[in-house]
Amino acid sequence: MAKLFRRLRYLLRQGRMERELAREMEHHRELTRLRLEREGQPAHGAVDRSARILGNVSLAREDARAVWLAPWLEGTWQDLQYAMRSGRREPAFAALVMLTLGITIGLNASVFTAFNGILVRPWPVRDPGSVVTIADAATRSDFSLVEYRYLAEQVRSFSGLIATRCIDGISEGCEIDLEGAPGRVQLVTGNYFDVLGVGIERGRGLHVSDDLPDAPEAVAVISYAAWQARFGSDPAIVGRRIRLDEIPFTVVGVAADTFTGTAVDRKDIWVPMSAVALLRPGNADVRERFASSKHSAIALGGRLMPGVPRAQAQAEMELLNRRFRLQSSLEDHGVLLMDTTFFNNPFKRKGTVSVFVMLFLGVLLVLVLACANVANLLIARAAARRREVAVRLALGAGRWRLVRQLLTESMTLACGAAMLGLGLATALPTVLLQLFEGPVSWHLRPDASVLAFTVGLTCFTCIAFGLAPALHAVATDVARTLKPSADQFEAGGVRLSLKGVLLSVQVAISVILLVCAALLVRGVWRGYSPELGFKADGVSVMRFELPRSFEPARHQVFARALLGVLDNEGESGGLGYTNLLPFGALQSGITWSTFRPSGDEPSADRRLISPSVSNGYFEVLGIRLVDGRLFAPGDTTDVVLINESLAKEFWPGESAVGRTIVAGIERRIVGVVQDVIFTTSFAPEPTMYRSFGEAADTQVVLGERGRARAQAIAAAARQIEPLVRITTSAFSDALDRRFAGSRMAALVAAILGIFAVTLAGVGVFGVFRYVVQQRTREIGIRMALGARPRQLVAFVVVSGGRALAIGLAIGLAGAFGASAILRGSLHGLSALDPGAYFGAASILALTGIVAVYLPARRATRVEPTTALRCE
Amino acid sequence: MPMALTNQPPDLLPGTLDMLILRALIRGPLHGYGIAERLRQVSQEVLQVGESSLYPALQRLLLNGWVKAAWGASENNRRARYYTLTAAGRKRLEAERDEFQRLIVAIQRVLDGA
């Protein structure tokens, strides 16, 4: 032990040790020369002779060093060679193990890469360590612009305080019309670029002088990506005039490639905070929002003064915040200072972390499964090598030496797998990123911490799958194994217990993964099934957008004129319009109204969806009228249609036509139409259709017959308002995009599930093959005594059956638990959906049968005479 | 000076050099050159130990914990590494010496008897 310690110490200080040795030898040489001179040798001859006496110096140094290092290196080199040799001897085995582990490690490293890149990475700014974000401690919400100005003026522990905002608030988003196509804009305070130290590719960042509240400059900085994609890397971009919501702005700079913004989503363009007055002229609402101390949509951040600890800055911030809120009679909850990583911002991480928890759990389960599987394979192979190990032990090999050797073998496999895994981790995260909806901007590439994670994971896997079989292998009773008549049955029984546990683990995990995968796949399937209640195929949707910088009155004039055009064009059918399409929530948000049937207590208000539609809408989407009539030309605005669910709930067994409900005002029901699924709850919500009165957000749906008139409508719309942007797309494409996230999740889950079941199948197969191998002799005797093949198959199956049953039970229990987490992504599917469980069970059963049947059949093919001779 | 000097030390029985170094250190700490000199003088110029075998041997002894090394000033006022016998080294020396005696006696007997 002490020797090992000394050796380690040498390794740690190798450089110094070698220098000391060199110095020592130099001294020796010197003294030898002096002695020779004293003895009467001429000076030059003495040098020569002393060199001859002393021999080759560097060789001596090598020899001295080898004393410390050789046995280790030599041993490891031997182990490595041995591992390579056994890998070459069974290339299929080595390839299988490396592929299994490689894919598993790759999956884990990919999830970690995404996690690292999205959640743990700070803002891409200069010295991110001294930059913090600031949030209200209780509500986690943001601040008002008024409070920001107060804080920025008073605060002493920050070298600069910055604020950012989306142009139309948090919920409405940051979308803007950038040169005729949608772009993402962020309003920032004038000191944003200077305080954060954002890298600039061209031109300059924004300055404080651009952001004067009374005289805002129409200037903008664009992102590197936008510069490349939208402006073709225009070398003369600085100074170029661009249109934002049809308002001219001047580009003053391009941010560096590495700067992807300080928000979760990608930003294309940054403009001064005060420029909102330019972008939304004549809009009193927006002005009000920016001037009120109650309206809070400002995200705060800042750079600490050098040397100021975060606690001190926090204390000052709290004090200032309290003073401000007292002054403006607002509630004060204290403030929270956090670093800029996404993960440490509880307000922002909400949705993302749960996704990662699910992903991590999934890939971790696969990892455990893979380790159990490889361990099983190794044990099975160790059975074949028991003799070899016993011979080595008998020849005097140390048990630890053998364990080390076997572990080196696993390590070699694990290293190969890690290479494969890292390769996977460079490609896969970008795919994973698609799981998140919306435009995201992270650079997801493995870095040092990913490498460290992978190496750690590899060591862990290596020990997890290698140690148990290695210990198992050297725990052999030498005499017994080498004796030809050794009693194999007993040994087999003992050995099986560890394998049994591993087998149970495998079955349990694959049940969990398969059930989850099946649930997700079924959930997505549901999103495409015709149970939605409307027809999307062959339907196109036309949308009209005016620059948001236009005054509200101008929007209304356009909308009214457009309705006139549409009513005119729609007379011959195949054309309808609405302000809310099913699953259209991404565009404008579903508006819920409250209602109650007439005569009920006002307290019994319920929520309903109330789209405004034209009769043509029902026709184009194929929504049938089940009772009463559609809208008629003379109808007043209080005439409504309701859906079947609503009618059945309030007037069961009777006709709802002629009844009234109160939604704002009292409304008369003239007809009942089929249920339509509107939201991702996938349940029919109470719905009330109104005829088009107050027009806004008009979306035109065109059926087969109406398609031809799209041109005419577009032309007419442009005549009313030349700056209108018209987009026409297939309704099914819009739905596809809406479901892209969950479809990706289901795809990932299905891949994991199939991978899991393949692994489990290989594992079960390995175990039963091993059972057969172990019991060849016993089976032979039974055959000789007249046992039938069928009985023998049963015998083999029973020997592994208990482990299978236990695994199945644990797996089902785990799947119940896991599916509760998944509930949100199931599109209204029950977490106990029998279809999913049945599907998973049958896939597993099928795999199990094949994996058990093949070895069992082999058992019955054993020639009794061979079996009896075989050991 | 006899010209019979070789630049290689005479072949020693394996392990003997270690024992001789330990023996040389029994009277007190010496540096590498000192050990070589001591062996040369005591053996009357028969054992000329070169660096190529001395220093690996010293490393071996250090690794096994039979000697300790420490830097000190040499007689010509230069820094030199002095080697000291440890308790374990002393024990080792005794054991090796007994074993060696036995071996020598055995070899002698064989030579005489043949």
Image (tube, coloured by chain):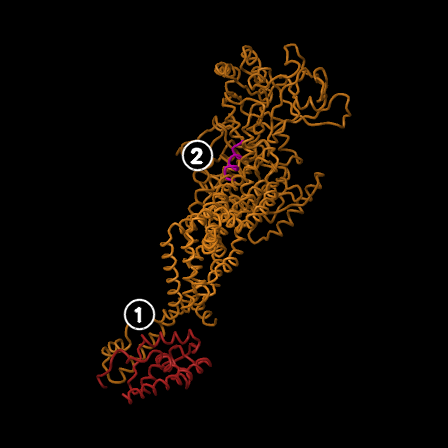
Chain colours: A orange, B red
Q: Position of residue A776 (x, y in %)?
A: 45, 54
Q: Is residue A38 above or below residue A85?
A: below
Q: Position of residue A572 (x, y in %)?
A: 54, 10
Q: Amino acid at mark 1?
A: Ser
User: Could you classify mark 2 by the number of other residues whose Cα lies within 10 Å: few (under 14), some (14-19), or many (20 or more)?
Assistant: many
Q: Is residue A525 above or below residue A69?
A: above
The chain ID associated with circle 2 is A
Residue A641: in sight, yes or no?
A: yes
Q: Are marks 2 and 1 in contact (CB under 8 Å)?
A: no
Where disc 1 sits, the SS reads: helix
Q: Which mark is residue A58?
A: 1
Q: Amino acid at mark 2?
A: Trp
Horizontal side of residue A407 vs B76, given as left or right: right
Observer-nearest of A329 and A696: A696
Horizontal side of residue A207 vs A669, given as left or right: left
Residue depicted at 47% across the width and 63% down the height: A476
Q: Which mark is residue A70?
A: none
Observer-nearest of A763 and A240: A763
Which comes sooner in the sequence, label 2 or label 1?
1
Q: Is residue A684 above or below residue A479?
A: above
Tell me the quadrant of the picture where the C terminus of chain A can be found. Answer: bottom left
Q: Which mark is residue A227?
A: 2
Q: Which residues are magenta?
A: A739-749
